[in-house]
Amino acid sequence: MLYERRNLRVVVASDQRSKEVQALVEACGYPFACDWSRIYPYWLVAEKRGLVEGDTVGCIYVVPGLPFGRVDFLSVDPGLRKSVRRWVVWGLIQSAMASLKAQGAPMFHCLLNDDSIMRWEWDALLERSGLVELDRGHIYQGVLADLAHLEGE
């Protein structure tokens, strides 16, 4: 367990939770048509106590690396009350930072999708934490199998 406070617990997601994670990510404006069956150990999930054991109310993608790690695709159940969503967002961000720090990353980068419904939650928390916006850009996605035609060019 990476985080536990109030009625929230954040843990590393097992592959068995991939459908829950996929549904949350897609509900928050990130449409990825890909195989979601293998998500361990790159996703953290937030569970709210008082719900059915294992119900996921939020998730975040964490990729350790040097000289920086990556944190992306913050996704929280849009049906939660705003005050509950804030606790979920805070718990996920704190857990992601702790995970990267424990794996030796001295800094991290993240992308914010301007169309994501989670954008306002990211912005407010990251700015309060003293983070700096480096640039704005676009997010591209490609299926590696579809890019095989580029070999040798």
Image (tube, rainbow, N blue to C red):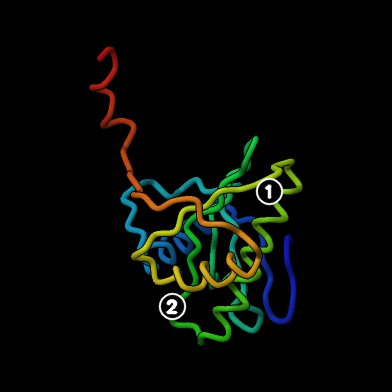
Q: Nearer the viewer, residue 104 or 127?
A: 127
Which residue matches tag 2?
78
Q: Quadrant of residue 53?
A: bottom right
Left or right: residue 83 compared with residue 6: left
CA–CA distance in space, label 2 to label 1: 26 Å
Amino acid type at circle 1 is Leu
Residue 94 coordinates in the image, percent (x, y): 68, 63
Q: Of label 2 and label 1, which has the lower sequence position?
A: 2
Residue 8 coordinates in the image, percent (x, y): 67, 75
Residue 51 coordinates in the image, percent (x, y): 59, 81
Query: Which quadrant of the figure contains the C terminus?
Result: top left
Residue 65 coordinates in the image, percent (x, y): 62, 38
Left or right: residue 105 compared with residue 40: right
* Residue at the spot 67% in from the left edge and 61% down from the top edge: 11
Q: How crowded is mark 2: few (under 14 residues within 10 Å), some or many (20 or more)?
A: some
Amino acid type at circle 2 is Pro
Q: Which of 24 and 16 is in front in this view?
A: 24
Which residue matches tag 1?
100
